Amino acid sequence: GSVWCISSSSISYPMELDQLTCHVSTDFDVFPTHTDPVQRYTASRLDQGGNYLKGCHWAPDGSCLLTSSNDNVLRLFNTPSTAQVSSWQPVVTMKEAELIYDCAWYPQMSSADPASSWLVSSCRDHPVHAWDAFTGELKASYRNFDQFDAVTACFSLAFSLDGSSLYCGLDSMLHIFDTSRPGRQYSKRNTWKRGTGCRGCLSAIAAVDDGLVACGAYNGHTCIMDLRSGQSEQDFRHRRGVTDLVCADDGYTLLVGLRACGDVLHYDLRKPDKRVHCFQRTLRTNQRMYLSLAINQRYCLSGDQDGNVLTFDLWANRDVAEVTPACEAKKVTTTSVNGVACHPHVDWIAVTTGQRVIGPGDDDTDDDSDKIDTEGSNSSDTEADEAQALNALMLLAKPQVEIA
């Protein structure tokens, strides 16, 4: 994988994502317009499929950016200021032992308070790990146990809005930790009861309100759980598995991303019986593609498999029965755009691109459907390396929109 840094001068909607510069001004209201070539941070190529980025997440205070990648490493990059982007390197790395399932920032994180600067990650066959964002050291572990009293991994993570609770998604089960008490003390909530709720591996979690959590499963179920009563308040059924859930700050806008399916579903939880929008993106594999809200939470941003950054207007053409296309699509790469994250304070969008590439010398031992097999087209190791070079983290300009 590689890291690109791109910014733009002030723009108007529709969004412009032109790659203009490798410098960032200390004054975030002013963007330089140089056209210097961009140097890239390149991660080592792995034996199978190479390394590629799998998503990015801004810290709540916007001071740094967290990325996860196929080499099972979490990397932290400081938000650029006066430094040249050619020297933009990860300042902290955190190595997990197995495949990373999910990661999340502590929502009250502030770099001015080192005690609050931490994050959690979940990986295969291991407990949930809490990492110090300043040192990269392991602070604590939150241990989930199965019915045989063996440590088991959770598939998804989320914090409550105030950060007092940590939600871990397992198989038809939600474990709730008190964030101040790591270890094995947690409460349980069954997400599947008498044919209602979410059944199967909980692939995504999003806090909706105090005591309300949205849960999504790989079998196509989504529900709104009331953690106080342990009951599902609202149920949704989809034709594909859920890979991402986003809930807006208003507490009733819910966005659902599906795998191997181009649908991005928009629901109003005040009227759950009818979806508001069904947006479209290109997605033919099981690769997770993240969603992000921007511009006063009016617009939803997402990537697609064709290398586009898509913008969906949540306010336009509401309650339209037919499929709604993106209101803007900008080509940023020739490979998959799997992650989009909007900076909480600065007009920037972080974008991760890339997917697994299998060359002639790689041993394709599993059947992950997000792989691209280059052997059938008589490709060489050089072609696989060129495809691998497309894996990047890019910093783009966020659309500027006048909202009446």
Image (spheres, grey):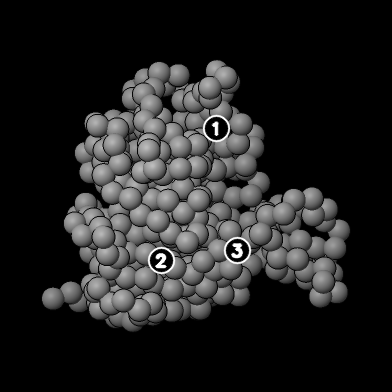
For image coordinates 57% across by 19% down, the residue present is 148
Q: Which residue is mark 2?
A: 264
Q: Is 152 positioned to the left or the right of 49 in the image?
A: left
How busy is the neighbourhood of tag 1: few (under 14 within 10 Å), some, or many (20 plus)? many
**Residue type of the residue flagged with mark 2:** Val
Marks 1 and 3, how far apart in space? 24 Å
Identify which residue, 132 or 271, lies in the foreground. Answer: 271
Marks 3 and 2, how far apart in space? 15 Å
How busy is the neighbourhood of tag 2: few (under 14 within 10 Å), some, or many (20 plus)? many
| Residue 362's disc number | none
Q: Which residue is mark 3?
A: 285
Which part of the image, by quadrant, shows the N terminus?
Answer: bottom right
At which x and y percent is residue 37?
57, 74
47 versus 179 height, above or below? below
Q: Which residue is mark 1?
A: 153
Q: Is 280 positioned to the left or the right of 29 in the image?
A: right
